[in-house]
Amino acid sequence: MVVRRFAFPLFALFMLVLPALPVPDFWITQSNYIGLYALVALGLVLLTGVGGLTSFGQAAFVGIGAYTAAFLATKVGVSPWLTLFAGVGIAVVTAFLLGLVTLRMSGHYLPLATIAWGLALNYTMANMEWLGKYDGLLDIPSLHLFGHDLGTGRGLHDVIWLLALAAALAVTHLLDSRPGRAIRSLKSGSTMAEAMGISTLRYKLVAFITAAVLAAVSGWLFAHFQRTVNPTPFSISKGIEYLFIAVLGGIGNVWGAFLGSAVVRVVEDQLQVLLPQLIGTSGNFETIVFGIVLVGVLKYAPDGLWTFVGRWLPAAPRVRDWGQAAALPARDKPRRGEALLEVDRVRKEFGGLVAVNDVSFRIDAGDIVGLIGPNGAGKSTTFNLITGVLELTSGSVRFRGAPISGLPSRGIARRGISRTFQHVKMIPEMTVLENVALGGYLRTRSGTLRAMLRLDREEERQLFAEAERQLARIGMADHMHELAGNLALGPQRLMEIARALCTDPALLLLDEPAAGLRHKEKQALAGILRQLKDEGMSILLVEHDMDFVMGLTDRIVVMEFGTHLMEGTPAQVQASPAVRAAYLGTEH
Ligand code: ADP
Ligand code: MG
């Protein structure tokens, strides 16, 4: 713990006093490069390691920062400090436009688009007369601070490292925040995050733009470090090298970016001297060695070299500092008996298969309604239609009197419908508490900059207090600091219910919540649902365990082969020969 607490201040202090020590200029230069690389790699940690979005084009954003600084200072005469804002501004606009086009698409489109964009920008730099073509732009003025010329080596070192360390802190803060949890949820697909009200496109853009800004800052520094720019350092092969640095260091970890930069910079330099001596001819042979190293790292330490360092810096458990936090805002609840959900002839066709065939039913506020039927009857599909995960083929859904069909799933969440999934959807590498806190997304406000500057702490305390309250309600408060992925299936389902409750819903949709639970856990769950009902909660419940459903529900809707078979009280349903036939026909 102690090691962890002082690691960052000690490291920062060491880097900042380094130029004042009798260290050879060569090592100061290396250190400058490490800081410059780390800035870019940090962006990739956020974008690729955390967000799961691969970019080969970061060198192009470095180029934007560098060329903007060079052009404005040498051709327009703008003060060097102001060019930083211009470079960052251009990077933000470019990343926004590029991201808007490519981030909606899944799979390989983004990596391919970043390659295309990297090549295009590099080509532009190399062929524009006003950017000096292959010769680039020369004689960039050096940075001045309080009348001191920062020059290119020792003087600039602390500017580079102050920015790199500040960026590391900002990204660390971001990852432990409302927008950060949204970015961390991107890798697990969009369905769950959207159902919690998160716009996944928005956070893909946030990650993409943040990475572009960090790269542009690195480029701006680079221009004042080299005092010239030309297209070579911003080529696509440099973009690949940045990705290599991040992967080697540990793509999911902020400090992996620094470790990867240090290792690559130092080894690259040694190899450039050593390899030609060994082989007898000169060339970029270090690339081959790096390729081999990368394969080895991916095989034996897939989380990068940071794994070996991180072992000595155990993660501190979250301090429970939210005991006194105020309650989050809550929504106006519907009055008991008010028409809550009206499902009107909803239909879903998958190609030729009619999964849901013009099904209608309604839920009044305060009711627990069961939705039962054999496997494949269309229950989960009905859930997906109500919550906007799937588009209706026809029909309509009204909630609290207003139509909700056609809204995106996050819009429906905003109106007060929350749900769990038949196949648990969670972020396994987040703690139980953080997973539940995702449910409170729409009840909180903090954005990216607030989070980076740590101005979101009070709201975070409120959110965690609420998340803990919901976990306590389902008897899981003791597990809040565990990683969600380490839980057994039963507790994972309960965690999903706590997450849904954390949204402060007016209607709760539970898809097979008791599946995989042990007998005692089932009884406890039934108790919790009864208590929720007493508090006025309305619930739509899919469940196979008949005893569970019969003892709990006010009304039951029975589906078979996509159609509405019958509807009635538990007693009526139990007595129905048609229901019995449906179940005997397929299972049991
Ligand atoms: P239940 O939840 O009642 O067991 P589902 O709603 O999951 O049933 O499925 C109803 C039918 O729709 C099944 O035949 C299933 O194979 C089909 N189905 C569900 N989702 C899809 C999909 N995304 N694409 C094609 N068919 C689907
Ligand atoms: Mg199902």
Image (cartoon, helix red, strand yellow):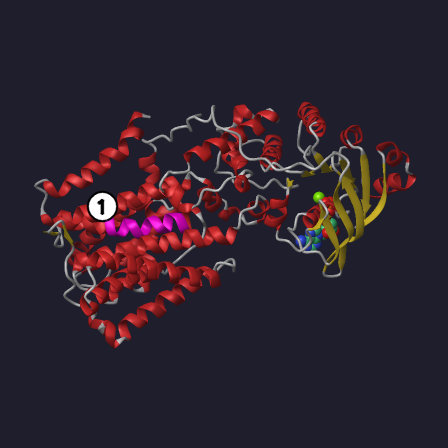
Does 70 lie within the magenta span?
Answer: no
Residue 253 screen position, x and y as percent? 36, 42
Q: Which residues are magenta?
A: 35-47
Prevailing secondary structure class for the magenta stretch in the rendered image: helix
Q: Report if residue 301 is visible in the image.
A: no
Expressed as whole percent of the image width and height from the top left, the position of residue 533 reads 72, 29
Q: Secondary structure at mark 1?
A: helix
342 or 524: nearer the viewer: 342
Left or right side of 520 for 452? left
Task: Tell me if 578 is positioned left or right of 588 in this view.
Answer: right
Can see residue 132? Answer: yes
- Residue at image location 22% in from the left, 73% down from the top: 132
Magenta span includes 37: yes
Image coords of residue 84 (percent x, y): 26, 57
Give me the residue at 21% from left, 68% from top.
Answer: 76
Q: Quadrant of the C terminus?
A: top right
Q: Nearer the viewer, residue 383 or 235?
A: 383
Above or below: residue 327 compared with residue 258: above
**Compared to 8, does 97 lie above or below?**
below
Q: Quadrant of ligand 2?
A: top right
- Is label 1 within 8 A of ligand 1 (CB to nearest ligand atom)? no
- Above or below, 71 against 561 in this view is below
Task: State whether residue 198 is above or below residue 516.
Answer: below
Query: How many residues crowd around disc 1 within 10 Å: few (fewer than 14), some, or many (20 or more)?
Result: many
Query: Residue at label 1?
Result: 161
> Which kind of residue does numbered mark 1 sit on?
Trp
